[in-house]
């Protein structure tokens, strides 16, 4: 029988490999540090959104100073991975991330 779909306020995350899965709440994701391959912080996680096609995205806020001038970016969920208590960017570098269009709610 197919597994039940995750509740809207949660998202699945592959940890270690396809056979090792855990479910993480959006609130837990928002509390995580979002880092790149160099382990430097990239931005603040603002939430998770779902496109009209069903794809899910992590929305981050990047840049700016004291909340002014920051850019919101929606990153496809397949470009992030949970490693311990951090969310890491994968399959994309910082230049590609910065080239993504600004996310407008």
Image: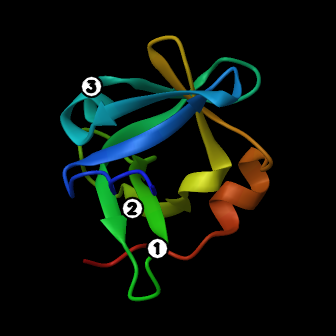
- The residue lying furthest to the top in this view is 84
Which callout, 3 or 1, points at the residue further toward the start of the chain? Answer: 3
Which callout, 3 or 2, points at the residue further toward the start of the chain? Answer: 3
Residue drawn at x 64%, y 59% is 98
Query: Up-down: is 84 above or below 94?
Result: above
How far from the left and from the top, in percent, is residue 60? 40, 50
Cα separation between marks 3 and 1:
22 Å
Q: Which residue position is annotated with label 1?
A: 102
Residue drawn at x 24%, y 46% is 67
**Number of callouts:** 3
Q: Residues within 10 Å of mark 3 (few under 14, many from 20)?
A: some
Tell me if label 3 and label 2 are in contact, CB under 8 Å.
no
Tell me if label 2 and label 1 are in contact, CB under 8 Å.
yes
How far from the left and from the top, in percent, is residue 27? 19, 35
- The residue lying furthest to the front in this view is 1
Q: Residues within 10 Å of mark 2 (few under 14, many from 20)?
A: many
How far from the left and from the top, in percent, is residue 33? 43, 23
Cα separation between marks 2 and 1:
6 Å
Q: Quadrant of the N terminus?
A: bottom left
Q: Which residue position is annotated with label 3?
A: 31
Label 1's element? loop
Q: From the viewer's perspective, is the residue at label 3 or at label 1 nearer?
A: 3
């Amino acid at each position: 029988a197919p597994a039940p779909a995750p509740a809207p306020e949660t998202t699945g995350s592959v940890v270690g490999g396809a056979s090792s899965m855990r479910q993480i709440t959006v609130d837990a994701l928002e509390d995580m540090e979002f880092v790149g391959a160099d382990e430097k912080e990239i931005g603040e996680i603002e939430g998770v959104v779902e496109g009209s096609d069903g794809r899910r995205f992590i929305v981050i806020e990047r840049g700016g100073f004291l909340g002014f001038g920051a850019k919101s970016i929606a990153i496809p969920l397949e470009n992030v991975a949970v490693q311990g208590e951090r969310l890491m960017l994968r399959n994309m570098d910082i230049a590609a991330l910065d080239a993504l269009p600004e996310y407008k709610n």
